Image (spheres, helix red, strand yellow):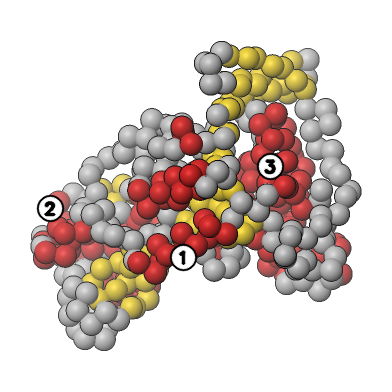
Amino acid sequence: MLVGQAIGTRHHGQRVAEQRLFAEDIQLLEIKRTHQGFLSRSKKRRLPRRGQARQRDIEPTSAATAHSSGLPRSYLRRLTSISTLAARGPNMLDSPTLDLLDGLRRTMAEKSFLVVTGAGISTASGIPDYRDKDGVRRGAQPMMYQEFVGNPAARQRYWARAMLGWPRIRASQANAAHRALATLQAENLITGLITQNVDALHTQAGSQDVIELHGSLHRVLCLDCQQCSDRAAIQEQMLAHNLYLADVHATQAPDGDTLLDPAYEAGFKVPECPHCQGDRLKPDVVFFGENVAPHTAARATLSVEQAEGLLVVGTSLMAWSAFRLCKAMAEQGKPVIAINHGKTRADELLKMKIQAPCEHILPWLAERLITR
């Protein structure tokens, strides 16, 4: 596996990327190169993949040409955003190894890739992630599924903290990385998208048929009647019955959780199901100790079988549900590539790893794959 990480510096007014390529023999190669020619693009048109019809007769390479083709405005906004970010080039991409980026581009141009994302893709949207660069989980231990289901006090604690954490989740906006993947999908340049995230930002960005491996915080499931409710409606109910928390501040934690003083939890009134009035409501997400829904796992497995490679973005892959997809892909002899800061559970399976911000890399990649 090749791992690349570069540090941007200034030299005589020019930004220089110091590339570090770590080969399997642990030897370090340092290469300095300027960014001249970094933004050159090929005018060759992309051909459809084998057995795949072109989605559009004309592939727009700018917002202007896209507009003339009558494409939706949401697509035009994504394309304009991608072009703007990619055009900044060196200013936005001052850390990645250029050789590895070019290798990533070439590989994805030749093969149909599936994408799996994790918490790291949403940090630029203001949502905290779970782990440090060594894959060690930050903060308190998460609540286990068995505890949540079997202990009313645990549900009370969960919902008190979640009520204060929801506004951050609801207000979060998809970032450049989400939009770049949505554009790649719209152009048939990736075969599909699987996310471990529960923030629904891929859908907000315009991605279609996203496989939400761990569910979504935007839905609430009743454990008694199995009906789903909208999270926003449940939030209104909790606010109305827990006014004493209206002015309480709590530190944000991953997945809409907060670090709330336990003194505030005892008097919290948990929400009731709008359908059966039961009080065993659970966010429609996979808790630690809970299994991914069988139909969701089956869809993810099928997606791996149909793809020719896997791009992993913003995840350490410590959760088995995502790591198993990398393992299956590697066992089939297909390339697995990661864009992630720090260690991943699949490091030994990776063909390549780029340690750089995905909100910088993915717009760059989308621009070059679309306009090749």
Given residues 351 and 311, the one toward you in this image is 351
Q: Is residue 118 visible?
A: no
Residues packed near mark 3 inside 10 Å, few (<14), some (14 to 19) or many (20 plus): some
Q: Are marks 1 and 2 in contact (CB under 8 Å)?
A: no
Q: Quadrant of residue 81?
A: bottom right
Q: Give the residue at mark 3.
A: 107
Q: Tell me the residue at 35%/56% (across/down).
A: 256
Q: Is residue 104 visible?
A: yes
Q: How many marks?
A: 3
Distance from label 1 to label 2 (Cα)? Answer: 43 Å
- The amino acid type found where label 1 is placed reads Arg
Expressed as whole percent of the image width and height from the top left, the position of residue 330 reads 50, 43
Given residues 19 and 296, the one toward you in this image is 296
Q: Tell me the residue at 16%/70% (across/down).
A: 269
Instruction: Please tell me which of labels 2 and 3 falls first in the chain.
Output: 3
- The amino acid type found where label 2 is placed reads Ala
Residue 263 got which mark? 2
